[in-house]
Amino acid sequence: MGEQLAGKQAGKQAMKQYDVITALDICVDLIVKGDVVPRFNQQEQLVDGYYLEMGGAACIFACQCAKLGLSTLGVGVAGRDLFGELALQRLKECGVDINSVRVCDSLRTGLGIALCKTNDRAILTYTGTIDAVEPGWVEEKLPFARHLHIASYYLMSSLRPHWERLAAYAKTCGLTISLDTNWDPSERWNGIFELSPYIDLFMPNDSEVMAITGEKDAFRGMEKLSGYFKNVVMKMGEKGAAIISNGKFLHIETITVELVDAVGAGDSFNAGFLYGWLNGLSLEDCLRIGCFCGSSNVTSQGGIKGQPGLEDLKKLQGIKLNSFIQTK
Ligand SMILES: Nc1ncnc2c1ncn2[C@@H]1O[C@H](COP(=O)(O)OP(=O)(O)O)[C@@H](O)[C@H]1O
Ligand SMILES: [Mg+2]
């Protein structure tokens, strides 16, 4: 009898073939730099440079998870076009499981065109495949994962009405859940507090904390949010990151690096933090790994090129590596 029970539990464990599952906002970013303010009437103007890279907060997050060795399932849609091929190639190279990505004939791959001046940028977004994930596709995979990360909460608006139900179901399947909404273009910040009972890690940046709470001081805003969320993890760019967990506050500095661009820093941070958290490391070590991933990210163009792998992480001083669980 005892043996039977142990066998059943082992079976339940074995079903969890993924450490992390996330719904992907598949798109590419075209970043154009220089004299980028368009002059109409068919004028041609020369720019300084450009680059094209896979974008999407969830995609960048998934890549960083996989690079750190977490077994990561992405559920998404790619267009049957060159940009879709690029995004799929990047996800695959980084080690993300893309067996649950559908390639679609009728949708074009999402595109963000960022026009970057020295101190400002404008972004033109074509949604396409970004918002094409169906809730049932996520639902059917939830029992096989340990953790659900919800990214791009506002851009993936078709999924938004379903997250509460999906999160409740994820809980019955034993998953922990993290949420990084990113900025809400409507600035209404609807839906967050309804989801809060299911969220183990809420991961906004400081601007988002201030916008959600109406507080001018991000730390005070964080305190307010900690009344709703078990753990509030706040990213603060070059000022590092902080957490309030069970009333305990901790802030750590990030690593000083030469900034190339900040695309994806928060998403890489999330993955690094989560890597530590899923491995049962201290909150301080989770923040340190998050900052390590975020700061490495900003040293290269785009969201994935600068992301560290597990070997780079091992160089981080003072983290007790022997406590890391082998995830594969
Ligand atoms: N200029 C920077 N120098 C060093 N680290 C940075 C820099 N910008 C971001 N980071 C790291 O990346 C993390 C996330 O970046 P942040 O810009 O706060 O998130 P988001 O992209 O969500 O706005 C920060 O907590 C920090 O550790
Ligand atoms: Mg962010």
Image: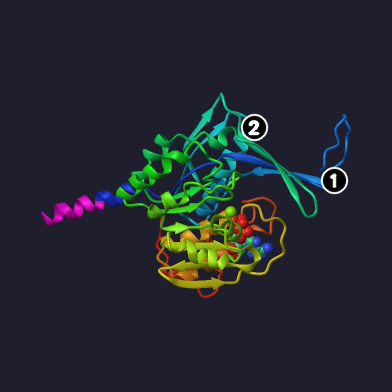
Label number found at residue 35: 1
Q: What is the quadrant of residue 39 in the picture?
A: top right
In this view, the residue in front, 36 or 12, is 36
Q: Is residue 4 magenta?
A: yes
Q: Percent from the top left, x then y, of residue 187?
A: 59, 48
Q: Quadrant of residue 240?
A: bottom right
Q: Main secondary structure of the magenta part?
A: helix
- Report the side of 164 relative to 224 (left or right): left
Residue 152 place in picture, x, y as percent:
54, 46
Residue 229 horizontal side relative to residue 287, left or right: left
In the rendered image, the residue lying farthest to the bottom is 318
Whole-percent x, y for residue 123 in the image:
70, 43
Q: Is residue 14 visible?
A: yes
As drawn, the residue found furthest toward the left would be 1
Query: Quarter containing ligand 2?
Result: bottom right
Q: Secondary structure at mark 1?
A: loop
Identity of the residue furthest to the front in this view: 214
Residue 24 placement (x, y as % from top left): 52, 42
Residue type for callout 2 = Leu
User: According to the image, label 2 marks what residue?
Assistant: 82
Region of the chain picked out in magenta, as a range: 1-10
Who is closer to the viewer here, 93 or 9? Answer: 9
Name the kind of residue labelled 1 in the image: Asp
The quarter in which the C terminus is drawn is bottom left
For residue 265, say whether it is visible: no
